[in-house]
Image: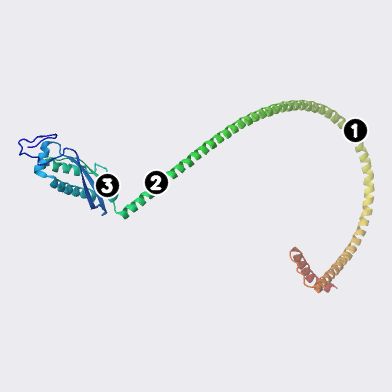
């Protein structure tokens, strides 16, 4: 028989207390060493199981069916098997996350609860309290973590710098936009003023143009009227002058006709006498002209011959002083003269 908690008296006297079972929650530590991960890294873990034997019936089941020694072996084997299966399914990077997480050991706890419940043991919790990687790997991971932290800090600093640059750029952009808006407003004001001034100048020029046009039109009208009057007066004066001129011309022509008839008769007589004298004089002049023509031809031939010899003397002097190069139109002119002289020289010599 069993007794509950508290002070108890054993009657009769030959009964004794064979086992004392605590109803408090008991913590059981189950270390696992050299557990391989999925990437074949050996890690060390420490698993803590909290269980209790809640009542007298559970205590009787525990004492008479299991016992403390068998409980220790059962817990060690179950923890070892469950932890190895759990760790083998994870990489070494995820093993560190198993510590202090009850969710990762929920399946192992459920299996233990099912196996120990029939022995009166109730498992309250199962937690992996410590995970330890190999020293060299732990050092590399620490360095990697430090580097990652430095990279994250650098990224944060870079992000902050980018935000500062962005904010400064936005501020400058706002200032530039404000300055642009101010300039645009100033330009728009200047444009309005210029348009107003231009419109005023256009209006003034239009007024001046209209005044000048009216003045020109009036002057043109006055000039046209004046020209009409002057034309009419000129026509009247022209008609009067024409009549006077016709009358005076007719009288003068009659007088000149009479005088001309008289002069013509006198001139005819004189002309006939002069004609006779002129015929005789012309015959004598023709004879003199023929003689002068023959003398002129001979004189011309002589002058050509003398000119040819003068040119030859000049070319001779040029040839003595050395070679001369003459090109262009002047050279062609000299060659033509030389050719003409060569062809004219024999004819002249034969005449001489």
Q: CA separation, marks 2 and 3?
A: 27 Å
Percent coordinates x, y for residue 314 in the rendering: 83, 70
Question: Which label was assigned to residue 152?
Answer: 2
Sequence order check, earlier mark of 2 and 3: 3
Q: Quadrant of the N terminus?
A: top left
The secondary structure type at the circle numbered 3 is strand
Figure quadrant of residue 306: bottom right
Q: Which residue is mark 3?
A: 130
In the picture, measured across the screen, residue 209 lies left or right of residue 263, that is left
Tell how many labels.
3
Sequence order check, earlier mark of 1 and 3: 3
Q: Which residue is mark 1?
A: 251
Q: Quadrant of the C terminus?
A: bottom right
Front: mark 1 or 3: 3
Number of other residues with Cα within 10 Å of mark 2, as a class: few under 14, some 14 to 19, many 20 or more: few
Q: CA separation, marks 2 and 1?
A: 136 Å
Q: Write the residue at 54% across / 36% down.
A: 175
């Amino acid at each position: 028989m069993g007794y509950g908690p508290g002070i108890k008296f054993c009657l009769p006297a030959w009964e004794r207390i064979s086992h004392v079972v605590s109803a408090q929650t008991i913590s059981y530590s189950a270390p696992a060493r050299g557990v391989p991960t999925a990437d074949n890294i050996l890690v060390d873990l420490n698993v803590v199981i909290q269980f209790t034997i809640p009542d007298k019936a559970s205590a009787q089941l525990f004492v008479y069916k299991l016992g403390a020694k068998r409980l220790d072996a059962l817990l060690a084997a179950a923890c070892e098997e469950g932890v190895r299966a759990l760790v083998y399914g994870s990489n070494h990077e995820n093993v560190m996350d198993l510590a202090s997480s009850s969710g990762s050991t929920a399946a192992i706890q459920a299996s233990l609860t099912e196996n120990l419940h029939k022995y009166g043991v109730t498992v309250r919790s199962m937690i992996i309290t410590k995970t330890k990687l190999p020293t060299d790997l732990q050092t590399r991971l620490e360095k990697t973590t430090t580097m990652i932290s430095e990279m994250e800090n650098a990224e944060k600093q870079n992000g902050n710098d980018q935000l500062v640059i962005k904010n400064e750029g936005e501020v400058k952009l706002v200032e530039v936009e404000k300055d642009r808006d101010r300039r645009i407003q100033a330009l728009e004001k200047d444009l309005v003023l210029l348009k107003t001034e231009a419109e005023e100048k256009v209006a003034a020029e239009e007024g001046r143009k209209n005044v000048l046009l009216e003045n020109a039109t009036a002057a043109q009208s006055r000039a046209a009227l004046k020209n009409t009057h002057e034309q009419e007066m000129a026509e009247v004066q022209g008609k009067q002058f024409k009549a006077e001129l016709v009358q005076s011309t007719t009288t003068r022509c009659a007088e000149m006709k009479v005088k001309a008839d008289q002069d013509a008769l006198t001139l005819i007589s004189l002309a006939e006498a002069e004609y006779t004298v002129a015929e005789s004089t012309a015959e004598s002049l023709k004879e003199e002209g023929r003689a002068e023509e023959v003398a002129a031809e001979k004189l011309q031939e002589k002058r050509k011959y003398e000119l040819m010899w003068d040119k030859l003397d000049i070319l001779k002097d040029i040839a003595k002083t050395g070679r001369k190069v003459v090109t262009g139109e002047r050279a062609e002119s000299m060659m033509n003269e030389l050719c003409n002289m060569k062809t004219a020289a024999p004819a002249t010599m034969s005449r001489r």
